[in-house]
Image (spheres, rainbow, N blue to C red):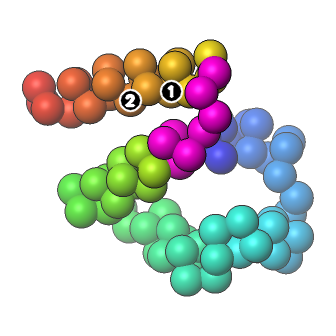
């Protein structure tokens, strides 16, 4: 979940409850990989960013056609446009 640090502390269960929820939602391997990335101090690597983009694109494609999907598609186009320009 993309939240600020304060919202994460207020809205997520501590320790084992969080781990169990995240592993159920993402799978153990994916969550372990994200934990590893969170400890990486050099920033997000291009390969990892591309995997996040592919996953988000897949999830957006699976949304039913409605205002939420239209917003997500517009937001994706904006983000990818800025990424390409960088």
Can residue 56 be seen in the rendering of this structure? no
Q: Are marks 2 and 1 in contact (CB under 8 Å)?
A: yes
x 22%, y 56%: residue: 46
Q: Residue at x 88, y 58 (%)?
A: 13
Instruction: Provide residue 78's location: percent of width, then percent of height.
Output: 32, 20
Span highlighted in magenta in the image: 59-66
**Residue lying farthest front?**
65
Observer-nearest of 72 and 61: 61
* Relative image position of residue 50 (x, y in whole percent): 28, 54
Q: Is residue 11 above or below residue 52?
A: above
Q: In the rendered image, which residue does mark 1 sit on?
A: 72
- Binning the other alpha carbons within 10 Å of mark 2 as few (below 14), some (14 to 19) or many (20 upward) gives some
Q: Is residue 75 left or right of residue 19?
A: left
Q: Which residue is mark 2?
A: 76
Crowding around mark 1 (Cα neighbors within 10 Å: few <14, some 14 to 19, many 20+) is: some
Query: Horizontal and vertical percent for residue 63?
Result: 60, 39
Number of labels in the image equals: 2
- Residue 73 falls in image quadrant: top left
Q: Is residue 61 magenta?
A: yes
């Amino acid at each position: 979940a993309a939240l600020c640090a304060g919202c994460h502390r207020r809205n997520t269960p501590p320790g084992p409850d969080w781990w169990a929820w995240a592993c159920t939602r993402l799978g153990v391997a994916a969550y372990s990989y994200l934990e590893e990335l969170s400890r990486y101090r050099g920033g997000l690597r291009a390969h990892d960013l591309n995997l996040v983009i592919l996953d988000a694109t897949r999830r957006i494609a699976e949304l039913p056609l409605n205002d939420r999907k239209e917003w997500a598609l517009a937001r994706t186009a904006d983000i990818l446009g800025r990424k390409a320009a960088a």
